[in-house]
Structure formats: structure tokens, C-alpha cells
Image (cartoon, rainbow, N blue to C red):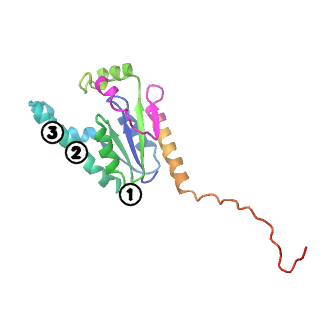
Amino acid sequence: MKSAVIVLNGASSAGKTSIARAIQRLSKSPVLYASLDNFTDMFHWPAIGDLDVQRECHRVGVSNFHATLPILASSGFAVVVDHVFEQHAWFEATRNALSAKKTYFVGVHCPLDVLVDREKARGDRRVGLSRWQFDRVHVQKPYDLEVDTSKQSSESCASAVIDFVTNASNRANKAPEPTPVAVTPRAIEGDSK
């Protein structure tokens, strides 16, 4: 898993950050953590009242996040990316940004009622955000692995991700098995039998 890139995608409050932090704790080698929230939260949102300016700030944060991904992926360390693909274009931008590296896309799911309860309990998310994202973030996303945080702990999900990536890497690095060749007897020169 040394230089793999893992992209976690799911609605707000699905458990992506908890899984990412668990991957960092459980991995045998260092793992960088890259979060979309860190880029969009570079702005002090309460000070930005104009909706058009808010949209532009958000667009800049998302764009800068995508621009940073190839730099992080070239570090030689594994990277876990915490994303929410509200728009299919964000998925495409992420895939394109990471095209030089083996990247594993992981869908992080849980039922809507669980998302809503978590969102309320957190208190740091706009109420209704997870409901709005729920039907959008997983549409037409080709995942390598999917986890459900309502059925597994973040540590269990992280272990499943690490195992999947490690096994996939081992399969990719394994020398192909030799193909058996059918040997047919040929006449030995001078043998008249």
C-alpha cells in the first residue's frame, strides 16, 4: 500500500474522515490525508454574505484541491483522499488529477436516516446537506470497493480498505504464472520407429 491512492467518496456525515484517520492509524507505512473540507474551509464563511461570492469561493476551494492531488500523489507515500462528488465533474477532475497513480475509489455508504442523525449530532454541518447529497454522490461512480458505515465501525471499514488495496497491489506485482505448453513428441533424428 506504500504509494497507493485511496479516494473515499460519500455524503457528508457518512464517515469518510473517520475511515481516513483509521487508515492512517492502521497502515504499516505513513499515509497522507487530503480532505476537500480543508480546502473549502480556507475561507471564513460567516464573513461572506454574498451568495455569488460564496459560490466562487467554493469553486476555487474545490479547484485548488483537485490541483493539489497530483502533487500529493507524487510524494512516494500512500494518500487517502476524503471527497464528496456532488458533481460528476468533480469525480472526473479527481480521476484525471490522479491518472498517473494507481488509484482505488471507495464508496462510503450508510442509510439516509443515519446520515441525518449524524448530521444533527455533529452540529458543524448545514442541516439538510447530507439529504441533498444522498442521491447525487454515488451516481455513475465506478467503485473498486464499497463500505457501509452503519454496519461496520470506521476501523473495520479501514481494515477492509487496507486489505483490499494490499491484495490488489500484491496481485498486480505478482509475476504471471507460466502458461503450460503442450509438448508433443517429435521424432528423434535417425529414429525409424
> Relative to 171, is 153 on the left or the right?
left
Q: Secondary structure at mark 3?
A: helix
Dot 3 surroundings within 10 Å: few (below 14), some, or many (20 or more)? some
Are the residues flagged by discs 2 and 3 in contact, CB closer than 8 Å? no
- In magenta stretch: residue 130: no
For the point 31% across and 21% down, the residue is 121
The residue beneath circle 2 is 63
For the point 33% across and 20% down, the residue is 116
Residue 51, position in %: x, y? 11, 30
Please provide the residue range marked out in magenta.
Answer: 131-156
Query: Residue 57 shows which numbered tag?
Result: 3
Number of marks: 3
| Pointer 2 or 1: first along the chain | 2
Mark 2 vs mark 3, CA separation in Å = 10 Å
Q: Nearer the viewer, residue 55 or 48?
A: 55
> Relative to 83, is 103 on the left or the right?
right
Closest to the camera, between mark 3 and mark 1, is 3
Mark 2 vs mark 1, CA separation in Å = 23 Å
For the point 34% across and 26% down, the residue is 135
Mark 3 vs mark 1, CA separation in Å = 31 Å
For the point 35% across and 23% down, the residue is 115
Residue 170, position in %: x, y? 54, 52
| Pointer 3 or 1: first along the chain | 3
Residue 60 can be seen, yes or no: yes
Dot 2 surroundings within 10 Å: few (below 14), some, or many (20 or more)? some
Which quadrant holds the C terminus? bottom right
Q: Secondary structure at mark 1?
A: loop
Q: Nearer the viewer, residue 98 or 4?
A: 98
